[in-house]
Image: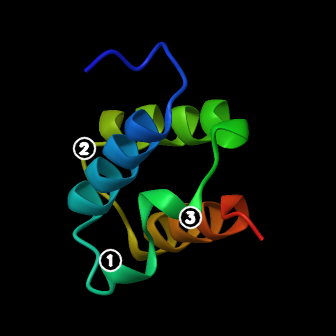
Amino acid sequence: MNLTTPSQENIEFMIEAVKKKLQLVNSGLIQGDDYTVDQYEDIKDLYEMVMKMPGFSVRDMEGIVTELGSLKKK
């Protein structure tokens, strides 16, 4: 997938990949369509950081989920 072009499809792909990597129990609370292309760079930065991390502490996971929550469209 080419993530250099901002699109809703790319956002949905990145959100799903983050949820899978974090193994979120309530992953239904975070959906790709909760985000807009305006937040693309922030989501991409978060996605790249998560994909590079080999593992997550509870604190890491809380921080990532909090960040995703703050990026949701209001």
Vertical position of residue 70 compared to residue 13: above or below: below
Q: Quadrant of residue 53?
A: top left
Q: Are marks 2 and 1 in contact (CB under 8 Å)?
A: no
Residue 33, position in %: x, y?
Answer: 49, 59
Callout 1 crowding tier (Cα within 10 Å): few <14, some 14–19, many ≥20: some
Q: Earlier in the sequence, mark 3 or mark 1?
A: 1
Dot 2 amino acid type: Pro
Quadrant housing residue 45 = top right
Residue that numbered label 3 is attached to: 34
Q: What residue occupies the far right of the structure in this picture?
A: 74
Q: Amino acid at mark 3?
A: Asp
Give the Cα distance between marks 2 and 1: 20 Å
Left or right of 22 in this view: 73: right
Q: Which mark is residue 27?
A: 1
Horizontally, residue 55 falls left or right of residue 42, namely left
Q: In the picture, which quadrant includes the C terminus?
A: bottom right
Amino acid at dot 1: Ser
